Amino acid sequence: MSNVVNDEPILTLIGKPSRVYTTGDMLTEDFVPNRVNIELSESGEIVRVWMG
């Protein structure tokens, strides 16, 4: 089950390119070296932050 994520507060802080998603969401496998990826739990807590 995928949640709709309000990523505006996060994008305001880190800018673009970025990707905010919930654990279990399908992701593309493209590599963007300067993209910040932020994985959220079902409750909206940050689980992982990574580049690429």
Image: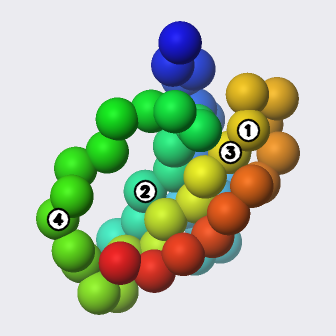
Res 15 visible: no
> Which amino acid type corresponds to the residue marked 2 in the rendered image?
Arg
Task: Please name the residue that numbered disc 3 is placed on.
Answer: 40
Task: Please name the residue that numbered disc 2 is placed on.
Answer: 19
Q: Which of marks 4 and 2 is nearer the N terminus?
A: 2
Is disc 2 surrounded by few (<14), some (14 to 19) or many (20+) residues within 10 Å?
Answer: some
Q: Look at the picture and state if 35 lies above or below 37.
A: below
Is disc 4 surrounded by few (<14), some (14 to 19) or many (20+) residues within 10 Å?
Answer: few
> Which amino acid type corresponds to the residue marked 4 in the rendered image?
Asp
Real-space Cα distance between discs 1 and 3?
A: 4 Å
Verify CB contact (< 8 Å) between mark 3 and mark 4.
no
> Which amino acid type corresponds to the residue marked 1 in the rendered image?
Ser
Place of residue 38 in the rendered image (x, y in percent of width and height, measured from the top left): 58, 60
Task: Please name the residue that numbered disc 1 is placed on.
Answer: 41
Real-space Cα distance between discs 1 and 4?
A: 22 Å
Report how many numbered discs are placed on residues in the image. 4
Front residue of 42 and 34: 42
What is the secondary structure assignment of the residue under circle 2? Answer: strand
Res 26 visible: yes
Real-space Cα distance between discs 3 and 4?
A: 20 Å
What is the secondary structure assignment of the residue under circle 4? Answer: loop
Image quadrant in which you'd find residue 47 = bottom right
| Residue 16 as seen in the image, left or right of residue 46 | left
Q: Earlier in the sequence, mark 1 or mark 4?
A: 4
| Residue 50 as seen in the image, left or right of residue 51 | right
Verify CB contact (< 8 Å) between mark 1 and mark 3.
yes
Q: Look at the picture and state if 2 lies above or below 48.
A: above
Q: Which residue is drawn at 42% across and 65% down?
A: 18
